[in-house]
Image: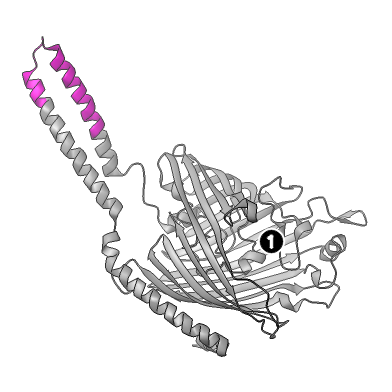
Amino acid sequence: MATVGVVLTLLRGETVRKFGEKMARFFVILLSLGVLFSSESMLWANPIEGDLEAKIAEFEKRLAELEKRNKELQVDRTGTEEPISVQVEELQRQLDILAEEVEKMRSVEQATELTQEDANKQGLGLSAAAVYSKSEGLSFAGYGEMVYQNYADKKEDGTALDKTSQMDFLRAIIYAGYRFNDKFLFNSEIEFEHGSTSKGGSASIEFAYLDYIAHENLTLRGGMLLIPMGLTNEFHEPNVFMGVHRPFTEKYIIPTTWRENGFGAVGSRGIVNYRAYVVNGLNGANFSASGLRGGRQKGAKAKASDMAFVGRLDVAPTPGVFFGGSLYRGGSGQNQLAVNNKKLKVMTTIGEIHGQAQLQGWDVRGLWSQATLDDVAALNTHLSKTGKDKIAKSMLGGYFQTGYNVLSQFPTNVSLMPYYRFERLNTHDGLVGTTDVDLALDKTFHTVGFELKPIYNVVVKADYQITRNKAKTGYNQLNMSMGYSF
């Protein structure tokens, strides 16, 4: 109830009251859609299974006809009737082919069910892990999302906010993988951002790696790797995370989507899952007062004079529940930063703890992260950063988020989930040699919204985000999105 009280306190005022009325209407629409989709859900229950059974029945019918015809020919056959003998051989060949196809369809040899827990063990979302459901051959999957943002007219201090409403086809993703055999596979994610490269968009590789499955509990992995930190960096499909936008802690401290070149191991033992990689370090020359995001090298001619280690450990005591932590440590100087002819290592350490529980309609998640940098004073001198532009020695952030599927007690696969997220972020937590802290970087976020999933692979979201900071320059915004995965 304390959390509800905080939200109600924040949602006072004429502007927010009007928004509340709009959101109430929007909730009614979503609820109506949820009921509509629920009534149709039985039609969507499992069309693939129905198609499979129909195809098996068709093949078995054809198989029976061929077997009957084969017997008739064998009865009529004499040693001198060459044409009939040829027919028998051809029928037998067709029988063998059909029998093999029916057996494949019955055993579902070419595709096995992949659960979210199985995907999590690989450090991937369900769609990203599609190749792991194959026994051999090509896999294809993907996701995408479109986002609408509408900003308030004023900041919290009453001054005008000059931001234009925007609608952006934020991402369109293709997952492509190939299973060579039971030991080797390739997996990749290719991302197109913002609709067009001619208008500030981009095309890039999010990950591309080879796996060698040495044992059922140990996989050796090398290539461009997703850094195994937090709740979003590896699991960032729009129908997986709550909220229109990903948490800000997992943007500026854990710089999602974060990928680097490297190699390592992935494995599990009982209820424990782990990932451990050696990767190229960050590029400290691109750090800023707002966080570490600019230091990502994204696998493109990455400087590797300084390497880094990152490891993650999760405990999953029951399906839908896991908790754990991860640690990253490595140099970010990359042999290019120096003061008074002394090379700077800029050792960077990022740690985080996290937990998630999805049980009986509830979805509860939490994360806390902190980053520390060495040689910060010298780094600021090298980069000529002064005052509020200085990079801090310490950065911290975290969030708590909860939602409840109001349709969870009904016999339907449709989900309608109101959610709330509280987040705190301060990338100027520790400055060296100055008291000129940028108060605008000490922020809190309150996000209240809803998401509707008519099926697991499709999601529509809407939320209202209240941003506050100690400089009183925060503002509110309305966000909406549509996403899909397959």
The image quadrant where one finds the C terminus is bottom left
Q: Nearer the viewer, residue 242 or 15?
A: 15
Q: Residue at x 79, y 59 (%)?
A: 346
Q: Residue at x 43, y 58 (%)?
A: 116
For mark 1, what is the residue? 293
Q: Is residue 308 left or right of residue 266?
A: right
Residue 24 locus on image (x, y percent): 44, 82
Residue 285 locus on image (x, y percent): 79, 57
Whether residue 126 is visible here, answered yes or no, is yes
Q: Nearer the viewer, residue 3 or 477?
A: 477
Q: Residue at x 93, y 57 (%)?
A: 340
Whether residue 269 is visible here, answered yes or no, is no
Secondary element type, mark 1: helix
Secondary structure mostly seen in magenta is helix
Residue 480 locus on image (x, y percent): 51, 70
Q: Is residue 42 left or right of residue 328?
A: left
Which amino acid is tagged 1? Arg
In the rendered view, tell whether residue 15 sits above or below residue 289: below
**Which stretch did the figure color magenta?**
71-98
Residue 306 locus on image (x, y percent): 75, 50
